[in-house]
């Protein structure tokens, strides 16, 4: 079993839909990242959080430390949101442990 | 530059060749990380430096992989006698400090293809 599990692996949505991507982890962490990766592109950090909830534009990230679970929500999705979304937890030693990623396609 | 840079962006090597991948972290960032991302997979940790000290190299897949950061700034990941399974994107990230609540900033990656 992977230390960081994401679901779903693939997601197709219609423009305007509300999207949720889930992440569960099994190790002790100091923080959790949500990252975005476009095809052929580098990785961009969307959020880093260790508790509660953060919002940036149409993106919302939540984390429940007790349940070892985080969610990334996208409201009013748009085709430009199409990308791979990766959950990564920062272990207590500092290194990141990544999930497998969720490939999101938003159709117009 | 303002961000993490990596070079080359693309590298094609024949099996058995040695390659060297470079990472320039954000100026002032103490910690530097190397990750390997195989096609269709999430990145996986290779090694971590704090200044010039390599504190964790537990992710290096074999003794053909070697990383250094001699002056605590630029880092080089070297792969000797490349194999086809080494084909991947190699990502470098830096942060102010490795531990605790410090965001890692990623470079664009080097895509290595071993023929």
Image: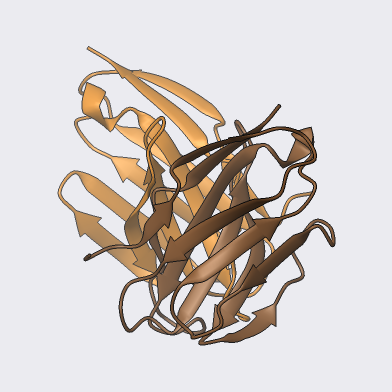
Chain colours: A orange, B brown
Note whether A22 is above or below B93 in the view shown: above
Residue B112 picture location, percent across and down: 59, 39
Query: Which residue is more in the foreground, B14 or A54?
Result: B14
Q: Quadrant of the C terminus of chain A?
A: top left
Examine the rendered structure and indicate whether residue A5 appears above or below residue B51: above
Instruction: Say if residue A68 shows up in the picture.
Output: no
Residue furthest right in the image:
B63
- For residue A89, side relative to residue A108 (left or right): right
Q: Residue at x 40, y 75 (%)?
A: B95
Query: How far across and how far down the image is residue B74, in percent?
Result: 45, 73
In the image, taking residue A80 as reference, residue A2 lies left or right, namely: right
Res. B62 image quadrant: bottom right
Q: Position of residue A79 (x, y in %)?
A: 24, 22
Q: Residue at x 35, y 56 (%)?
A: A45
Of residue B59 and residue B19, the one placed in the foreground of this image is B19
Q: Position of residue A60 (x, y in %)?
A: 28, 51
Quarter residue B44 falls in: bottom right
The answer to whether one can see residue B85 in this image is yes
- Is residue B48 or residue A62 the one in the foreground? B48
Q: Identify which residue, A73 or A41, lies in the foreground.
A: A41
> In this rendering, is residue B64 above or below B41?
below
Instruction: Identify the residue at image location x=81%, y=57%.
Output: B64
Asked whether, in this view, residue B85 is left or right of residue B49, the answer is right
Which residue appears at 77% of the width and 70% of the height? Answer: B58
């Amino acid at each position: 079993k992977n230390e960081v599990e994401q679901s779903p692996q693939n997601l197709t949505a219609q423009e305007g839909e509300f999207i949720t991507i889930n992440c569960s982890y099994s190790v002790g962490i100091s923080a959790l990242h949500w990252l975005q990766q476009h095809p052929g592109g580098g990785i961009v950090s969307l959020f880093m959080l260790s508790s509660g909830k953060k919002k940036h534009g149409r993106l919302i990230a939540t984390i429940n430390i007790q349940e070892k679970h985080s969610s990334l929500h996208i409201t009013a999705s748009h085709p430009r949101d199409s990308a791979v979304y990766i959950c990564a937890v920062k272990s207590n030693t500092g290194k990141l442990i990544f999930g497998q990623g969720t490939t999101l396609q938003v159709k117009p | 530059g303002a961000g993490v840079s990596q070079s080359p962006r693309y590298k094609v090597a024949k099996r058995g060749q040695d390659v060297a991948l470079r990472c320039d972290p954000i100026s002032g960032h103490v910690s530097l990380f190397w990750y390997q991302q195989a096609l269709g997979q999430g990145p996986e940790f290779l090694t971590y430096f704090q200044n010039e000290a390599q504190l964790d190299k537990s992710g290096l897949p074999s003794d053909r992989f070697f990383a250094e950061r001699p002056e605590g700034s630029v880092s080089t990941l070297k792969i000797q006698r490349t194999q086809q399974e080494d084909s991947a994107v190699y990502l470098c990230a830096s942060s102010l400090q490795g531990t605790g609540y410090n965001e890692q900033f990623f470079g664009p990656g080097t895509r290595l293809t071993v023929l």
